[in-house]
Image (tube, grey):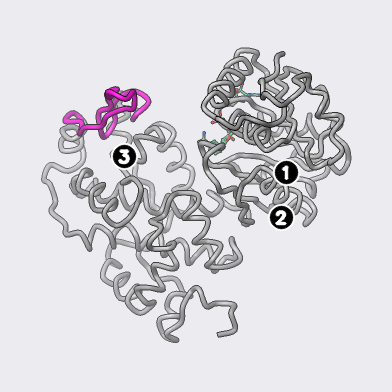
Amino acid sequence: MSVAGFPLDPGDGDAFAASQDLLLRTCVVGAGVMGTGIAYTCACHGLPVRLKDVRASALQHSLQEMERLLARRSDATGAAVRAQLDYQGFECASVVIEAVVDNLGIKNKVLGEVEGLVAEDAVLLSNTSSLRIDDLATALQRPQNFAGMHFFNPAPVMPLVEVIRGRQTSDYAVQTAVKQALAMGKIPIVVRDGPGFLVNRILMAYIHAFLRLLAEGVDYQRIDRVTEAFGWPMGPAYLEDVVGLDVGTQSCDLIFASYPERMPALPRNAFRVLLDAGLYGQKGGAGFYLYRPGADGRPERSVNPLAQRLLRERLAAEERPMDETQIIDRLMLPMIVESVHALQESVVASAMELDRALSLGIGFPPLRGGALRYADELGAAEVLARCERYRHLGETYEAPPLLRQLARDNGRFHAIGDGR
Ligand SMILES: NC(=O)c1ccc[n+]([C@@H]2O[C@H](COP(=O)([O-])OP(=O)(O)OC[C@H]3O[C@@H](n4cnc5c(N)ncnc54)[C@H](O)[C@@H]3O)[C@@H](O)[C@H]2O)c1
């Protein structure tokens, strides 16, 4: 297989075995969307990489994509990516990042194979977004050398990496994953294993609230306008179009099922209505919006009358007027509530790290500083009062004990652990 041509690299892949710094020897398994982005990011940061897939066509496509990305860079320097169908060189790897399809059986098989080939102290990292690290660890002889390393799409661009500590993950494995992320120019946040880890779990609380607003007949264009004015880079309808409604629905279903009290299943939701009509989002040219190539080649967006009509016919016949504060509270309170649960459960060490992860991972409105900073700005007593206002809508809006305590003590999430 060929090697992606980074100009300053000898191009023969020998840099991998010759590398003196063991941390730099990275293997990536799975050359799809994520594996390609991860391998490319390693190479851009001077880390020689071996990229393995079972399909030659996937490797070919991956190398083409890397050449395309490289062509856009004016400062293209870096190491080589060697694309291969076998496990050659894995015995020298210090880190193996697994990015194959999100299927427990396939991942267990791949991780088991890799563990049998690598050195005893090599660390295996999975980029899964929906499987649990503890479930993946069951296939391994050395689960202590295994952790999650969750990149966000597109991997070369998104700065955040969640490093996921499973029940058996050692400090050594966590430290290695953190070092690897830093060497790739990323910002790592260490989180505990659990459905959706940290960022997607909190994002899904917001998406769940969005689907409920649509089911009540609130217009999605209005929701997008109001949330963008609040500071989100894109409203939730546009966001899901970009993610792809099929992919979006899959993550929703998995994460909703894990938190049924606060995110009860929504069997007849807007995503399903649109998907049933063949509307997949931006990649298919139509979702909540229509996308046509503009003069500069970038897609131009306009509202999709078919989507509007289908939602009226299948979900809510009447449009429901709702003021801006209500829309924001209905969407933001569930995010705050889920963030407080994650903090209470020690999924993340501090409010500061949680907020940083939301800003870097999903573009939480920068001026608001994160869900818990926003809650601190409103004041815990005010957030509690707003939660009470929507309590009739179920546990989604029920204030967790930590929020109640801060409301009583006039405390702040960002002061917890400060000794103040
Ligand atoms: N796409 C995203 O937005 C995103 C974001 C974060 C994490 N992830 C996670 O990244 C992982 C990969 O997702 P993706 O979107 O890149 O998928 P993808 O379908 O684009 O790529 C998966 C690749 O794995 C390869 N593969 C399958 N079996 C293999 C095997 N036995 N050995 C080697 N390669 C094999 C396939 O040929 C394919 O090229 C998943 O676990 C997913 O949850 C995806």
Sequence-wise, which precedes: disc 3 or disc 1? 1
Q: Which mark is residue 366?
A: none
Q: Given the image, on which type of amino acid does mark 3 rest?
A: Tyr
283 inside magenta stretch = yes
344 inside magenta stretch = no
Q: Position of residue 293 (x, y in %)?
A: 29, 22
Q: Position of residue 75 (x, y in %)?
A: 60, 32
Alpha carbons under labels 3 and 1: distance apart: 36 Å
Mark 2, Cα crowd under 10 Å, few <14 / some 14-19 / many 20+, is: some
SS class, disc 3? helix
Q: Nearer the viewer, residue 365 or 327?
A: 365
Q: Given the image, on which type of amino acid does mark 1 rest?
A: Ala
Q: Given the image, on which type of amino acid does mark 2 rest?
A: Arg
Is 416 drawn above or below residue 397 in the view shown?
A: below
Q: Position of residue 36 (x, y in %)?
A: 60, 28
Ligand 1 closer than 8 Å to the CB at disc 3? no
Residue occupied by mark 1: 137
Residue occupied by mark 3: 238
Q: Position of residue 50 (x, y in %)?
A: 74, 27
Mark 3, Cα crowd under 10 Å, few <14 / some 14-19 / many 20+, is: many
Sequence-wise, which precedes: disc 2 or disc 1? 1
Residue occupied by mark 2: 167
Q: Quadrant of the N terminus?
A: top right
Q: Which quarter of the frame holds ligand 1?
A: top right
- Where does the magenta region start and end? 282-306
SS class, disc 1? helix
Sequence-wise, which precedes: disc 2 or disc 3? 2
